[in-house]
Every structure is written in C-alpha cells, then in structure tokens.
C-alpha cells in the first residue's frame, strides 16, 4: 500500500518530513504528489522560509516524487534588482517619492519567468535555485549547489555556479525514461514496481510502461 499523498506528515514519528502538496497554500506554488521536504527545524515553514522573494506573478512548479533536503531554497523573481543604470539599490520598495520616480523602471524590468522543477529530482542539503531556472526530470542537485541555469533531465550538477558533473544515463536511456514517465503511473502500479523503479534499468521501466499503454 502506498502512503497517502494528502498526509502532511507521512512518517508520524518524524515530523521533520512533510509532503509539500498538502502544506503549501500560495496559488503561485504547485507541488506534485509524494514530493517531500526533510528539515529537523521547521519543515512546515517551507513555503515562507524556503521560497523567497515571491512577490510577483511568477510561479514555482515542482513535480512528483521529488526529494528536497534541508536548507534548499528557491529564489523567486522578486529578488531581482535593476541593473541597467549606475545603482542596483531598490529605491522603489521604500515608497514615497522614491517609488513615484522609479516605479516605471521596476515594472519595465524583464522577468526571468517561472521556476519549474520536473519529477523525481533530488535536491542536496543547502542547494539554491535561482529565479526562472528549469530543472529536468531525474536530475540531482548536489549539496550546496547554486543553480543559475537550466538543468537537463537525468543530469547531476554541483558547484557555484552549478555545472554538469555527469549524465546519470546515456541519451538513449534518458529518452526511454522520459517516454516511460513512471511518475505518472497510478500509485498502485508504482507501489507494485517500487523495487524496479529504485534498482532496475531504463529498459525495465520501459517494459513496464509498455504493458500499461
């Protein structure tokens, strides 16, 4: 039997682990089923402590079955400062005449866009994702990485700024996995084949997917 994805604490004895789907309330944050956050210090504060500068219309979308370690942070577009002139100081935010004179500058700034995370992505401890980044299915973000650019599917990245370390599989196997999209299978089927999903090969996953289509 699979865990209930609507349960806030899927491990009752460990409140440090939360499923994010039933936790978040912001209309600009969407999290898929079974994606969890693990933090011994305030896991339920994820929406406010780990999604930062979410002042604008940009969205954060995170797929299913992602594993997010403590200290992972998503910086949203509200963190951007104007850099077209001499100063990057955010005069506008303090109101008054400063805002009157500069609001049009801020509203004309190009947006980096939504931040989109695929399915089955593992975020290591203390990683940071910059505004507008897209992270592909099956990627691994190393502990402490600062992700400033898009990450291809099934790629391990690390460092500051994060750079590709290696692909987890060759191109053909990555295509197999993306076509199979095991994260979209019914939960009962994932449960039935959990061992294969964890330890099998892309060809094994492809065979299972072929049997349900």
Image (cartoon, rainbow, N blue to C red):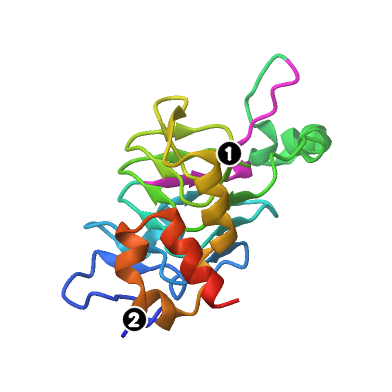
Q: Which residue position is annotated with label 1? A: 79
Depth check, mark 1 against mark 2: the one in front is 2
Q: Residue at x 30, y 58 (%)?
A: 199
Name the element at disc 2: loop
Q: Residue at x 44, y 42 (%)?
A: 169
Q: Nearer the viewer, residue 194 or 208?
A: 208
Q: Earlier in the sequence, mark 1 or mark 2?
A: 2
SS under mark 1: helix
Residue range highlighted in magenta? 72-85
- Give the CA separation, mark 1 to mark 2: 38 Å
Disc sitting over residue 2 in the figure: 2
Q: Residues within 10 Å of mark 2 (few under 14, many from 20)?
A: few
Residue at 42% from the left image edge and 25% from the top image edge: 160
Q: Position of residue 172 (x, y in %)?
A: 55, 44
Label 1, residues with CA under 10 Å away: few <14, some 14-19, many ≥20 = few
Q: Residue furthest left?
A: 13
| Figure quadrant of residue 28 | bottom right
């Amino acid at each position: 039997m699979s865990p209930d994805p609507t349960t806030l604490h899927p491990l009752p004895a460990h409140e440090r682990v939360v499923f994010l789907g039933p936790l978040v309330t912001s209309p600009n944050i969407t999290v898929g089923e079974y994606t969890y956050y693990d933090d011994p210090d305030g896991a339920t504060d994820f929406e406010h402590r780990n999604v930062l500068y979410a002042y604008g219309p940009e969205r954060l979308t995170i797929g299913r079955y992602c594993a997010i370690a403590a200290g992972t942070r998503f910086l949203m577009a509200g963190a951007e400062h104007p850099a077209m002139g001499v100063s990057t100081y955010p005069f506008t935010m303090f109101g008054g005449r400063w805002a009157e004179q500069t609001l049009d500058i801020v509203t004309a700034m190009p947006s980096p866009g939504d931040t989109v995370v695929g399915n089955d992505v593992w975020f290591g401890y203390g990683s940071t994702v910059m505004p507008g980044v897209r992270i592909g299915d099956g990627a691994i973000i190393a502990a402490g990485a600062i992700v400033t650019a898009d990450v291809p599917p099934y790629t391990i990245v690390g460092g500051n700024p994060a750079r590709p370390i290696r692909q987890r599989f060759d191109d053909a196997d990555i295509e197999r996995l993306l076509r199979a999209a095991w994260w979209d299978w019914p939960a009962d089927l994932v449960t039935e084949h959990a061992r294969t999903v964890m330890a099998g090969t892309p060809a094994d996953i492809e065979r299972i997917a072929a049997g349900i289509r």
